[in-house]
Amino acid sequence: MFNLILFGPPGSGKGTQSEKLIAKYGLKHLSTGDLLRSEISRQTPLGKEAKSIMDKGQLVPDEVVIGMISSALDANPDARGFLFDGFPRTAAQAEALDKLLELKEAPIAAMLALEVSEDELIKRLLKRGETSGRSDDTNEVVIRARITEYHNKTAVVADYYKKFDKVVMVKGEGTIDEIFSRLCTEIDKRA
Ligand code: AMP
């Protein structure tokens, strides 16, 4: 099993690149943002609770996303590997993920961290908001709150994986294909 984390701030291109990576490497895409939005559109109790938090640009509680990831891992016993997108976002989530993967004897091979300037992130998110239908992309106050959450709680996740020498920084600016090619070069070194 080959497991990767695609890491980076909101708007760094994780969703776009994930689609291309799962197609090329045959991995199962696990995006906690997508899983949460699916709960919201199905109007489940979890979705209703998560929506008000997501609309403020804050992180939903660790136990909620860890539970979702745990179920998704169990639901895909035959996967060749997983591409985690938007997860883990806190140190507690990273530790929980390692424990879950330990049970499967399938550790994280690498964390690919996309680097994008803050001006570019805000520009991209506001543009995405014109078509994404995501309420958290249309309001600059919420966008800035998401970036603040990233700096306060999520950036430390890279420090966690640095201890295990698993972090690979990748320039996240340029064309979609240029960035994809940089990611593939790094993955192919480790596959
Ligand atoms: P994303 O689609 O990854 O940009 O996530 C959208 C929103 O979903 C975030 O702003 C958070 O409110 C929530 N979310 C997604 N993934 C996580 C996570 N791993 N931990 C906590 N909240 C999350």
Image (spheres, rainbow, N blue to C red):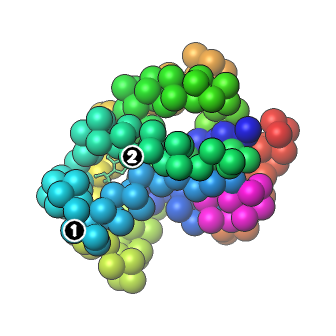
Residue at left 35%, top 66%? 38
Q: Amino acid at mark 1?
A: Gln
Q: Is mark 1 within 8 Å of ligand 1?
A: no
> Regarding mark 2 in the picture, which secondary structure is present there?
helix
Report, in whole angstroms, how far the alpha carbon at label 2 lies from the one at label 1.
16 Å
Location of residue 90 with respect to 176 vertically, above or below = above
Residue 24 located within the stretch drawn in magenta: yes
Estimate how packed mark 2 is, as few (under 14), some (14 to 19) or many (20 or more) residues with alpha carbons within 10 Å: some
* Residue 116 place in picture, x, y as percent: 52, 52
The magenta span reads: 18-26
User: Can you see residue 107?
Assistant: no
Estimate how packed mark 1 is, as few (under 14), some (14 to 19) or many (20 or more) residues with alpha carbons within 10 Å: few
Q: Is residue 50 left or right of residue 38?
A: left
Q: State the residue position of label 2.
A: 68
Q: State the residue position of label 1.
A: 43
Q: Amino acid at mark 2?
A: Met
Residue at left 58%, top 16%? 163
